[in-house]
Amino acid sequence: MFYKSTRNSEVKISSAEAIVQGISADGGLFVPSEIPSISMDEIVSLGDMSYAERAAYIFKKFLTDFTDAELKYCTESAYNDKSFATANIAEISHLFDGTYVLELWHGPTCAFKDMALQILPYLLTTSLKKTGINKKVVILVATSGDTGKAALEGFADVEGTSIMVFYPQDGVSAMQKRQMATQEGKNVTVCALNGNFDDCQNGVKAVFTNEEIKQKLSNGGMMFSSANSINWGRLAPQIIYYISTYAELVKDGEINAGDKINVVVPTGNFGNILAAYYAKNMGMPVNKLICASNANNVLTDFINTGIYDRNRKFITTVSPSMDILISSNLERLLYIMCGENDAQIRDWFGKLASEGRYEVTDDVKAKLKADFAAGCCDDVQTKACIKEIYDKYSYTLDTHTAVAVKVYEDYKKATGDNTKTVIASTASPYKFSTAVLEAIEGSVGDMDEFDKVEKLHQVSGYDVPKSLAELKDKEIRFTGVIGRDEMKDFVLKSLSL
Ligand SMILES: *Cc1c(COP(=O)(O)O)cnc(C)c1O
C-alpha cells in the first residue's frame, strides 16, 4: 500500500511519509492507493478485542509500512483508561428503537477530536523515526475551539515536538478558552488573535509557506507539520470507531452480522463522515451515510444537487465546530468517486478557489445520491431537538449531536427508512453549557461558566467530566493576544529563532 495525492496520481509515498508531510506539495490530500477490505468474519472477531487491539488490527491494513510492534505501541499508548474516562474508549447509548448514539467524547478534552489526536503524536513520532527525519517537529494549529485543545492535550510534553495554537479572541466558547489558557506542558504555546477564525487560519498558512521562516527553522533543526484533518494520520483513526461499533452491535445482539446500518454524522470539514465512507467501502454493511449540517448548509445543497457553492453568508451558530463553508475532506471523496482522475480534481478545486463554485458530473452526482443523504437545521430546531430528546428519553445532547438527531428524524419521516442507525455524537454537552441549558431551561440567567456546569449537572444527572471540573482551579498560563500582523514574529520569538 502506498499513498498518492488527489491532485497528482503519480505521487507514490509510504504512510509514514504522508503523515509527516501532512499535505502534498501540489496542494492535494494524501489518499491510500486502494481501499483495503475487511470480511464479516474479521469484523465479528473484533468483538472480542479491546479498542486498542481493534485499532491495531485495522491500522495494519492502511499503515502497511508500520511494524506490528509499532502499531501496538501507538494504539496502547493512546487508547487506555488513563486518557479516556471509559475503558471502552467510545460508548454506545441506545437512544430509542433501533437508534444508537455513538459517544466519541470520553477523551481528555470532551470532543471527538481526541479519538484521532490522542494517537496522532505517536503515529507522527514513529513516522519520523521510520523516515529517518531527525528534526524537531513544530505543530502549528489554527482552531475554532475543539481541535486546538485536543491537539495541545495530545502533543503536550511529547519529545521531539512542540505545538503552537492560535484561536480567535472572541470566537470560542468560555469553556474552550479556559481549556486552552490553562494547558500544561513544557512544549506548548497558546495565543489569542485579535481577529476571526479565518484570520487565524490565513496567518498560520502564511507562516507555513514563508520561505524565510522555513529556512530559519531548518537551520535550527526544526520543521513544521499539521494536526488538521487534512493529515491522513487524523483520518485513519476515525475509520476504526465505525467498524468497532458495528462489531460491538453484533456482539450485543443488537444487529445480525451482515445487517446494513445507517450512519448519521454532524459534519463540518467532512473528515468524520468520510471515515464512515471508508469503513463502508472496506466492507462494513451500510445503507445510507447521512450528512447533517447546521445553517451553514453548503454540503446539504451539494449532496442534493451536485453543485458546491460557497458564495453564501457565513452564519455563526450554536454548533460552532460545524460553522464552515469549505469542507476540505470532500476532495478525498470526489477523487475516489471520479475514478481517481487528478485532472478533474485540479479543475474543480481550481474553480472553488477562483469562483467559489463547481459542479460535478452526472456520474458523480449519481454516486453521491447512492451513498449519501443530507439535511440541515437551524439553531431554533437544534435547541428544540435537545429539549425534545431530553423530555422524551432523559438524554442530554450537545448542540452538534442535536443537529444530527434532528436531521435523522427528518430523514426517517421523509423516507420511512427503518434501518438500524448509529448517530455519531461529537461533543460532551458540558462544552456548550450555555446553549444546552437555554434549550432545556428556556434561559440561563447571569451565571459564570462553572455555575452553568453545575446547573447542567443537576439538569442532566451526568457526571461532570473530571478534566472540565479541574479547570476551575488551574492556573491560567496563557493570556497573550496579538494582532494579525504579529504572528510571524510571535512564532520566531517563541522558537528562539
Ligand atoms: C470537528 C467537529 C465536528 C465536525 O467534524 P468534521 O470531521 O470536521 O466534519 C462536529 N462536531 C464537533 C463537536 C466537532 O468538534
Image: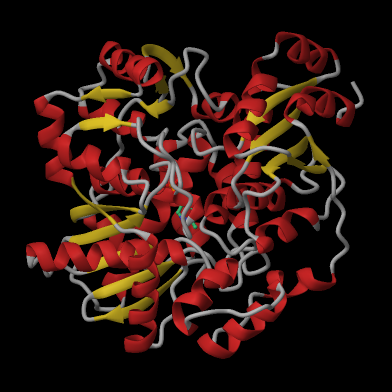
Residue 79 relative to residue 386: left or right:
right
Residue 210 relative to residue 477: left or right:
left
Q: Residue at x 30, y 13 (%)?
A: 347
In the image, residue 66 lies at what x, y percent? 53, 35
In the image, residue 403 lies at what x, y percent? 35, 62
Q: Which residue lies furthest to the right in this view?
A: 496
Find residue 129 and report its image quarter: top right
Find residue 462 and report its image quarter: bottom right
Above or below, 49 against 196 in this view is below
Placement of the C terminus among the 4 image quadrants: top right
In the image, residue 430 lies at what x, y percent? 58, 72
Above or below, 71 against 28 in this view is below
Above or below, 358 against 48 in this view is above
Question: What color scheme is it?
Answer: secondary structure
Label count reads 0
Q: Residue at x 52, y 33 (%)?
A: 231
Placement of the N terminus among the 4 image quadrants: top left
Residue 452 appears in the picture as rendered: yes
In the image, residue 238 lies at what x, y percent? 44, 50
Q: Foreground residue, 293 or 269?
A: 293
Find residue 133 and report its image quarter: top right
Residue 298 relative to residue 435: left or right:
left
Residue 259 appears in the picture as rendered: no
Q: Foreground residue, 170 or 107?
A: 170
